Amino acid sequence: MIARVSYPQGGQPAEAYRQRQFLVGEIARRQASVAAAEADIGRAVVGGLRAAGTPPWSAEVAAEIERIGAAERAVGQHEAELRAIEAEAAAAAAGADPSGRCPACRSAVAPGQRYCPACGEKLGARGELGAPGELAVPACERCARPVSAGESYCTGCGWRLALSRGRWFRTRWFRVLLAGIALYVFCQALLSGSHLPAFIVGELVIGAGLVPVAFVTWFYERGTRSQTPLGVLVATFVAGAVLGCGAVAVLGSPFDLQGNAKYLPVGFIEEGCKIAIVLTWLRRADLRDPDKGLVIGAATGMGFAAFETMQYGFVAFFTAVQAGTEPTSAMVALLNARAVLAPLGHGTWTGILAAVIWYERSAGRSPFGARVWLTYVGVSLLHALFDIAAGSSVGPAPIPFSSGAQVSIFAIFLGLLGFLAIVGIVRLGRRGRDPVAVFFDRAARLARDASRPQQPPPPPWQQGPPQQGPWQQGPPR
Amino acid sequence: MSLYDRAINAASDAAKASVANYQRSVRRRAVQEQIAYQHGIIQWSSARIGRLALEAGLPLPEQALPAAAAIRGFEAELAQLYQQLAAFDAQFGPPPPQR
């Protein structure tokens, strides 16, 4: 007896269904065999036609033969590609460098050279370098213009070349940062062991100057198209530190304000003192490039930040001594917090303001025009808000972040705002656009749109016929 | 070159080599898939040409004769199988719908 099973639909018993499935499978197998045999016949026919040079008997056959030819050519190309991949894998396994570069310093080396001409690394130790055809031809990644060795920027489009970029951990700014952190930690260990005053000073100088110096090195090395002379940067860094902080100390705050309001004049005074130092470079003929103005501004601000941090650290140390608490940990906490916040603060604000002045001058406008003053007000307000948020002060310094995580997050947000602005300036400048004009034109358009009274759009039956689309206008002339 | 430079270079080279190996294996797989696809096209077009040649009744090359004989045998078997299938469906009704 054949058991009946319950299918959702249909009434075949299970055994019969299995037999039917077997039949279906057999039919599929026979069909596949027929197709394979037909393909054998087809190959033989095509071979015969090609050998005899006779045309195919129908257009359909001609199309199929054409398709086979295209597929065979594609297979040939793919097989060549596969061989190249295998050869590359074999070369990599043997230790050769197919990029044609020194494995140590990444500078280009010619095939056959056994030592790198740039750093003296022995190349033979890692196997022969790539074949002559594989040696990379140095060219700009953006416009493909050939570039010569030693060029950092493409002369055709101003693109910063990948050849000059190197690896980020081999850059000077990273080495400065790394070495500074090592020295800072070393000094801290010595200080906790001995409490010698020399280590307190060392800790203070390194902790305060580490991030500002690394930031300025980054700008000097990578940030912009043209390099500002190192002497100018060092001079403006020191001037920002000593003269800027000195001027702020002498001027003080002319207003006797209490609470958060006291930070408002602080922002204006400090930004004013820093930009006054930056402006001393404005007349130098070799520093007319707006990028150089930006770097000078950043260096001045960072010098100021370093000196200010040092001052705060000193005050924090002696305040803790007077209060009878652990002075070193108070100082180190302040140094750490300000080191984290340093790239988001003084250097960025002064860099923005200096860049606006330099761009205005290079566009033929007054370097003391309305846009510059508006920027001055903007960065000063940003400075004041940042001070309020971070809880820092020009008076006896509380440790930043002491007032809670929410405040510090807001401070970082404000700092990032400035940092993004400076990154935007660098990027727009690199594309050959005037960032000041871009920003103020857009702001003016937004203000115009906002002030215009909003009228509701007319109903569709009053709007007239739809405009003619480009697809209805006929072919272009 | 300092020890620091060498250590950094060695770590960088190792990372780069593993990335390059991975990228190479992805490229290799993509190329192999393309080759298989193109072989499929060749097979399909050859079968189509073979079918057209059989339908046109053209004289076949000698090396195609065994395949032509095999096709005749397969077609006879297929006719029998289709008959059995029709008999099954007549006896037990239509099959359940395929999901």
Image (cartoon, coloured by chain):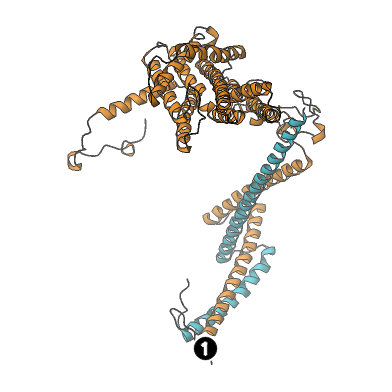
Chain colours: A orange, B cyan
Circle count? 1
Q: Locate residue A176 relative to residue A58 in the image: left or right.
A: right
Q: Nearer the viewer, residue A332 or A15?
A: A332
Q: Locate residue A68 relative to residue A425 in the image: left or right.
A: right
> Please, what is the three-letter code of the amino acid marked with disc 1?
Ala
Q: Quadrant of the N terminus of chain A?
A: bottom right
Query: Residue A404, percent across and down?
Result: 47, 37
Badge 1: how crowded within 10 Å, few (<14), some, or many (20+)? few
Dot 1: chain letter: A
Q: Name the residue rendered at 28%, 29% in the picture.
A: A449
Find residue A233 and report its image quarter. Answer: top right
Mark 1, secondary structure of its residue: loop
Query: Residue A92, percent across and down?
Result: 74, 41
Query: Residue B45, percent across and down?
Result: 58, 58
Residue A72 position (above or below residue A323): below
Q: Name the residue rendered at 60%, 28% in the picture.
A: A327
Q: Is residue A130 visible?
A: no
Q: Locate residue A209 relative to residue B97 in the image: left or right.
A: right
Query: Residue A304, percent across and down?
Result: 53, 18
Residue A412 position (above or below residue A81): above
View extreme (left): residue: A462
Q: Nearer the viewer, residue A430 or A215?
A: A215
Residue bearing mark 1: A3
Q: Quadrant of the C terminus of chain A?
A: top left
